[in-house]
Image: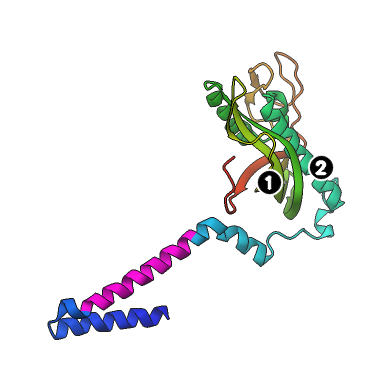
Amino acid sequence: MEHFIDYLSVVLILTAIVINMTWPISIPAIIFFALKKRKNNKKFKSTLINNEDYLNNLKSGKYCDVKPFELSAFDIRDIDKLKSFLFDIFVKFENAYNNLDYNAMYNLSSKKIFNMYYSSIECNSKSDEKRIIKDIEKNRMIIYKVSSSEERQMIFTMVEVSYINFVQNMNGKIISGSPTKKIKESFEITFLKSYGDKDLFRCPNCGANLKGTTCEYCNSKVNNCEFKIDSIKRIEINNNKEH
């Protein structure tokens, strides 16, 4: 149908040029083009609302659990236990973020994620508003890809959760969201275990330069050899709100 409309529009315009009757004949062509443009715009808006990438991943089978033999190189080989273990990391990290527990945040996330959330906290500290996330419940979790080498192990997951998410000011007034009603959201979360991570970094306890797993100034122990959150990507579906 779309190709027919294109063909008919071109014919009408060419006819108008040949017989020198541009306006009477070209008007239908303009109408056809406008209708097609309106139709295309409608499709585009629908794609934004339904998140075409996410739906295509579901249809293509990307979000399917890995086979049991693919977990042979991992300490936890039972996929359900592994999901529970990884989801617990996600919940602990969100709770640490809410409680401004920098040491726990660092132990539970990679450096890029820690820096991103730390910067967010620094910005929000200048405001009298605070975002609160609590009562996180797992609706569904899929481990759709894993990789393992001598240097690192990575686990790629899709997680659907329900939780309370709202913003309040210092006086306890609710700015946005609801302190009682849960919302549903989905994430792509990548977990990383990196061996021998000795990059120079700040100690989350005292802020001194850190190299290795023990701070030379305050003797804080930093866990660098367990799975950590390496990336969090929100999957926008329908009317879900931003995190």
Please report the residue visible at 27 percent of the width from the left and 77 percent of the height from the top.
29
Q: Residues within 10 Å of mark 1 (few under 14, many from 20)?
A: many
Q: Residues within 10 Å of mark 2 (few under 14, many from 20)?
A: few
Q: Which residue is mark 1?
A: 190
Where is residue 152? Give x, y as percent: 72, 44
Q: In terms of image quadrants, where is residue 132? A: top right
Tally of marks: 2
Where is residue 133? Give x, y as percent: 67, 34
Where is residue 124? Give x, y as percent: 55, 25
Chain part drawn in magenta = 26-45
- Decide which of 228, 5 is in the foreground and name it: 5
- Decide which of 180, 1 is in the foreground and name it: 180
Sequence-wise, the earlier of marks 1 and 2 is 2
Please report the residue visible at 51 percent of the width from the left and 61 percent of the height from the top.
46
Magenta stretch: includes residue 18 = no
Magenta stretch: includes residue 38 = yes
Which kind of residue does numbered mark 2 sit on?
Phe
Type of secondary structure dominating the magenta stretch: helix
In the picture, the disc for residue 85 is 2
Where is residue 39? Give x, y as percent: 42, 68
Which kind of residue does numbered mark 1 sit on?
Thr
Q: Is residue 1 left or right of residue 83?
A: left
Please report the residue visible at 26 percent of the width from the left and 84 percent of the height from the top.
11
In the picture, the disc for residue 237 is none
Quarter of the figure that contains the C terminus? top right
Q: Is residue 1 left or right of residue 218?
A: left
